[in-house]
Image: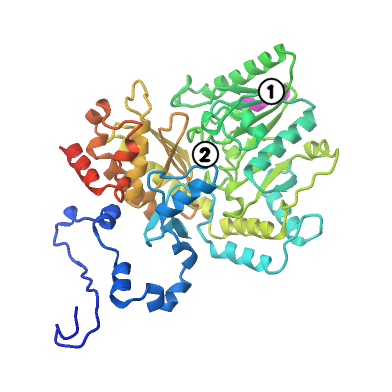
Amino acid sequence: GTPGKHGSELPPFIRVSCVLDLFGDGDRACGVSLIGAHQAVSLDPLHLMQKSIGKTPVEFCPSLSKVESSHRSRSADTLARVRQSVLGPNCSLFYKSAPLKIVRGVREYLIDESGRAYLDGVNNVCHVGHCNPSVSGAVSRQMGTLNTNSRFLHDALVSYAEKLKSLFPPELCVVFVTCTGSEANELAVRLARAYTQHSDVIVLDGCYHGNTTSLVDICSYDKYGAQISTWSHTVSTPDGYRGVYKYDDPNAGQMYAENVRRKIEEIKGKGRTVAAFLAESLMSCGGQIIYPPDFFAHTYAHIRAAGGVCIADEVQTGFGRVGAPYWWGFQTQKGALPDIVTLGKPIGNGHPLSAVVTTRAVAEAFKKGEYFNTYGGNPVSCVAGLEVIECIDREKLRDNAESTGALLKAEIAKLKDRHILIGDVRGLGLFVGIELVKDRETLAPAAEQAAYVSLRMREHGVLMSTDGPYENILKLKPPMCFSREAAVKLAQILDTVLQETVLSPSAVRSHLLRKDSVFETSPVALRKNTHDFFDMHVRAQA
């Protein structure tokens, strides 16, 4: 407005109109899920403010400088471009065509630079919720008091080891505190080799256990640059959906374990001996796979008979994610007791912390030479770990994982009847995988469709990612405070996305989505080319 135009001496202003009633026509409203479209066709009011009054928003209202000013210094596009120039070229990003700049987290939500909140379905690191006040408060207080290495006595390390040990069967009674999941698994392999005096390790096909040289050499997951060493041996993953032995086979666990026994004989035939069997208690990166419930018991028996030890990788599955009454994924396997357990990711709610828990006999065999870790077991890490455990108990998060996880899985399973793209829905607690296939008979993986669904879910305000050897698994590993309302909302939005024409059976058969174009044709590219998006969407609906 201009002074005097409206009968008063008003300063220049911007008028904002809000529609409070859609009068029954909400289906045609251009909602927040198309925020990219709004940004592409609307002027930035901050630029108008600067032009009209000659001041930036912060100059006009200094208190704005206190609101996460460091996060507002560069746009997402600029930050992505600079990141690419200063970080390693294979340091990946979620949503690489239009990556999110996240500036804040609250419980099961992440908030981007524009203030939009996203329901977080994938972040299994902030286990008890983003920015949990109990954890962040404990860390802040300890950081302001003392942080030093573990060669000094301090209460936090011993108290944490005692608390962690109390969550395990009595046989697992010795704790090593480390910093990352990779470091924990690396140490576990060293412990196994020290105890057995052998080197060879048996792993599952498609596994991932970390990014150190020896762990990359162990793993067979090409996505992470796997280069199998002569001392690493793979066996087929006990997958009840894609594997030889299906969900309805009562002997599946024993038969998959038989593959391990045959591999042991093969290794012996080469004049070698097995040191360890290393496997996640539920397979994560390899496709959110739940093993037959007796697989570990039979496998562990074969490994021990050959003189090896059994390592359960709980880096992604531990601390109650599988639901009450369990703390650990291996506890869902009947009669299974590992010799070594590795922990990471959720252990510190985002603070770099990990651990190895083992038997006294294995720990004693590792006594040759000093084991020292500069940061492992520092006071700040330990108080973070203690508070995570206390928070899980205090807020009954294992119970929530059990009940909300069951609801989430059931709501998504209902969609399978309406959408033939869904081949399998599997999971325990808040560890859920949705396998998309182009054909339920051939199980042809729907990788392009999975990528498209993930991107469209993001546009609707839900974050989920894809994984698995074929990249056709939608994986869900949300914070443990994930609510029942959030579970229903996620399933409803997934139902909406799966109804899009580009995901119809005829579109799938005609290869409307191609691997080389899924990112370009997804609405995630709205800000870059709005007109092309609407043109594509109209053609698809036609």
**Image location of residue 348, percent across then percent down:** 61, 54
Prevailing secondary structure of the magenta residues: helix
Residue 12: in magenta span: no
Residue at image position (20%, 88%) is 9
- Residue 347 appears left or right of 431: right
Q: Which residues are magenta?
A: 298-305
Callout 1 amino acid? Trp
**Which residue position holds label 1?**
231
Callout 2 amino acid? Asn
**Image location of residue 257, percent across then percent down:** 59, 22
Mark 2 Cα within 10 Å, few/some/many (few <14, many 20+)?
A: few
The label on residue 90 is 2
Where 152 falls versus 474 (above or below)? below
Where 73 falls versus 484 (above or below)? below
Say which quadrant the N terminus sits in: bottom left
**Image location of residue 138, percent across then percent down:** 63, 65
Residue at image position (23%, 71%) is 16
> Which mark's residue is nearer the viewer, 1 or 2?
2
